[in-house]
Amino acid sequence: MSTKTDDLPLAADFAPASRDDWRKLADGVLKGAPFEKLVGKTYDGLRIDPIYERARDATAIPARLAGAPWQIMQRVDHPDAAIANAQALHDLENGATGLTIVFAGANAARGFGLPPTKEALARVLDGIYLDAGIGIEFEIGPQSRDMGQHLAELLAARKIAPSTVNVRFGLDPIGGGGVRGSSHGSWDSIAKVFGGKITQLAKIGFRGPFAPADGRVIHDAGGSEAQELACVLAVGVAYLRALEAAGIALDAARRMVYARLSADADQFLTMAKFRALRLLWARIEQSCGLTPEPMFVVAETSWRMLTQRDPDVNMLRATIAAFSAGLGGANSISVLPHTLALGLPDAFARRVARNTQLVLLEESNLDKVSDPAAGSGGIETLTRQLCDAAWTQFQEIEKAGGAFAALEKNVIQSKVAAVRTARDVNIAKRKDILTGASEFPNLNEKKPAVLDVKPAVLPSSDEVVTTFDALAPIRLAASFEKLRDASDQMLAKSGKRPAVFLANLGTPADFTARATFAKSFFETGGIEAPGNDGFSDPAALTAAFTASGANLVCLCSSDKVYAMQAVAASQALHAAGAKHIYLAGRPGELEATLRAAGVGEFIFAGGDALAMLKAAYERMG
């Protein structure tokens, strides 16, 4: 048997399939519709084709050491340091290989976090063997910026050499300023303090890295993949310049900077984004006259994709995100617990977050192949496209004076806001589906348990010198969740949810498809839509409507039945007291006739569901 990797003996009896062969199959399914109908676009305008040929000249992108697993980071953010310590010890005993220590007021604290004191640091790390190779990463804010010095004092007391501790310090003044929308000084003054602090930590013996170029700032605010990458490059370059100004050689400075990226449930875009960062940073190093080395890249599953409704689906989202980041070459991954959007996660949610990665590593062996996406035509193309788009945006930030100046001028924020607006439109129209929130809702779901811990409240630490637009974090499902919250409040107050009566016309074969669509449509907004067996008699229809107690109605049936029964049904329902009548489907040529009979709106795929649902609440008073 041949040892060539391209040989596939089991397929030897089949003719090789060409692109043209696949294209013919696709055209057959399209039945005359244009092929462009299958082409997708990202929020950066990048083209995603349905068919790609193998990229035969591709090579693996250097990332983690071959066969080396990524660090399984577990988030430690309980405000009580003693409880946080117990959680951390349990996590390390059960598979975690690193801890992300989150302090209150940090960029990604999500409302919780440890007190920003050296006492809290000592307590949370009590009993943890810091020189045993585990990864430690700090998530810090303005009040906790001295944690590096506090750690040095703690290690000295324990007689542990700083060089033996694998710690990332999280010193990110640009990212912090971007999230807060303010600065307590000029960049020159901030950069001087930044460079001095890192120089001091390096002299103590810490290996670093010290400063993250944090793409989550852009991602959490609703930005695109290319915007996230461009920001990482710009912030990373700003930190390199600050370190060089502090007297640190570039060859050493580049090892003091690391990157953070968000990983979401878009598998291919996430993989391409992590791969693109490697190529882009190598280009930065080459521009500095350095031989490229793999950058340390931290991944965290996306905050913005988490939903409060049907939060179990967050487990699936996080699994896809961790899978994609791992295959994309991340050095460490932190999975946000699936209940974090509801409050501080309990032991079960923490275990699921930890075990998500353990299964991917220990059972799926995802770390055993370096850059498995190499050669995939689709992912290679996406990687190149992201590199080009991100580099162009990086150059625009540099022309604005660098990352900090671009924030002060709102250059970055305006571009992110444009993408966020486009996302909002697609979410409202349910083109971007959020399972459990904007699609497939369950009004009777039980909320999972979270810990009874109040969010941290911290005083402002510095006098604000400059303000600009903040890159405030969002969750994509929040707009639909507000409607569900309103429904819950009505249920608690009156014992009933708001409701719409489904006026199903004809037989189940006529109305089931559109009744199912209408039920999902209204219940995404918390408006109950009970089913029924259908009606052919207007008198029976109006009697059932009156008995339902609802004042909103949605006609559901086929176009054929609408042509015969919709006008009479609408007139009868209007006379029976319906405040507003919807019709499921596009009206076509019947629109004028239907409106004259009392139909107010038409619901269909691609319509602005969010606006209609908000208006429904207003009509119900």
Image (cartoon, rainbow, N blue to C red):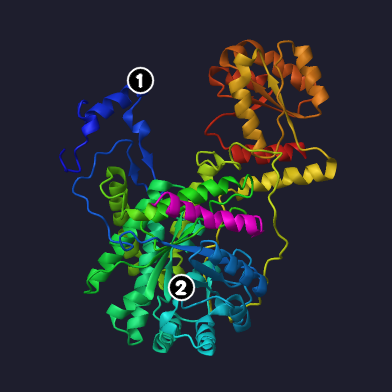
Give the residue at x 73% y 61%: 452
Quarter of the image for the C terminus: give it: top right
Measured as percent of width and height from the top left, residue 550 is found at 78, 29
Q: Using the image as rendered, state which of residue 433 and residue 621 is in the foreground.
A: 433
Q: Which residue is mark 2?
A: 174
Left or right of residue 334, residue 329 in this image: left
The disc placed on residue 547 is: none
Query: Would residue 401 be seen by someone viewing this image from the given angle?
Result: no
Q: Using the image as rendered, state which of residue 413 and residue 33 is in the foreground.
A: 33
At label 1, the amino acid type is: Lys
Question: Residue 394 occupies which quadrant of the picture?
Answer: bottom left
Q: Which element is circle 1 on?
A: loop
CA gap, disc 2 and disc 1: 53 Å
Give the residue at x 60% y 23%: 514
Q: What segment carries the magenta color?
A: 340-365
Measured as percent of width and height from the top left, residue 280 is found at 30, 62
Measured as percent of width and height from the top left, residue 506 is found at 66, 12
Measured as percent of width and height from the top left, residue 234 is found at 36, 68
